[in-house]
Image (cartoon, grey):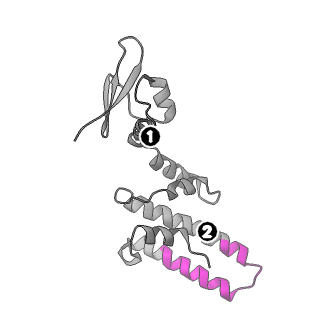
């Protein structure tokens, strides 16, 4: 069997299965039982079991992501989750919402060098959910309104 996504993620983040919450451990146990079932069943049933395994793999990965999202650094798998056809719609939406928080959107803009003369509608279209006012603080950034007439903003990094 191929190395599963959740196992790769656990290894990358140096997490132990025994330290995961019990419901996640139960899902992993069920995953292993399904793997054993493949060797004991007819070949005609294998595609169905493999599909269940793949779905369960993504579900376990999403649960781990959700449990440790504020502590983990290797979250690039969230994008993969959002594109998988086997993952339920609500799990996909949760993965996408975790990918694009207001602060990460501003960070990406700063990294690209787009910090001045940003329109309010532009920012909302990019996914900013915070209500934008004159000087809006979002994480480590301030959206400062630069025009008294038009809704134009610049991004300023807050020094800590």
Foreground mark, 2 or 1, reads 1
Q: Residue at x 50, y 67 (%)?
A: 60
Mark 2 Cα shell of 10 Å, populated few (<14), some (14-19), many (≥20): some
Looking at the image, the residue that sits furthest to the right is 44
Q: Position of residue 141 (x, y in %)?
A: 32, 35
Q: Mark 1 points at which residue?
A: 108
Give the labeled residue for mark 2: 54
Quarter of the image with the C terminus in it = top left
Q: Closer to the camera, 9 or 69? A: 9
Residue at image coords 56%, 57%:
81
Q: Looking at this rendering, what residue extends furthest in the front direction?
A: 113
Report the side of 160 relative to 80 (left or right): left
The prevailing secondary structure element of the residues shown in magenta is: helix
Magenta segment boundaries in residue numbering: 27-50
Q: Which mark is on residue 87?
A: none
Q: Where is residue 139 in the image (x, y as percent from the top left)?
A: 31, 40
Q: Could you tell me which secondary element the residue under label 1 belongs to?
A: helix
Percent coordinates x, y for residue 119 in the rendering: 46, 23
The residue at 46%/30% (across/down) is: 123
Residue at the extreme left: 160
């Amino acid at each position: 069997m191929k190395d599963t996504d959740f196992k790769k993620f656990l290894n990358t983040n140096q997490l132990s299965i025994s330290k995961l919450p019990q419901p996640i451990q139960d899902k992993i146990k069920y995953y292993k039982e399904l793997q054993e079932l493949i060797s004991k069943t007819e070949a005609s049933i294998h595609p169905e079991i493999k599909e269940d395994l793949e779905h369960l793999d993504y579900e376990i990965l999403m649960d781990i992501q959700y449990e440790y999202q504020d502590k983990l650094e290797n979250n690039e798998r969230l994008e993969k989750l959002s594109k998988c056809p086997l993952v339920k719609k609500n799990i996909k939406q949760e993965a996408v919402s975790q990918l694009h928080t207001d602060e990460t959107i501003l960070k990406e803009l700063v990294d690209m060098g787009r910090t001045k003369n940003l329109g309010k509608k532009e920012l909302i279209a990019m996914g900013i959910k915070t209500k934008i006012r004159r000087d809006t603080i979002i994480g480590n950034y301030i959206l400062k309104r630069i025009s008294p007439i038009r809704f134009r903003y610049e991004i300023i990094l807050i020094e800590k």
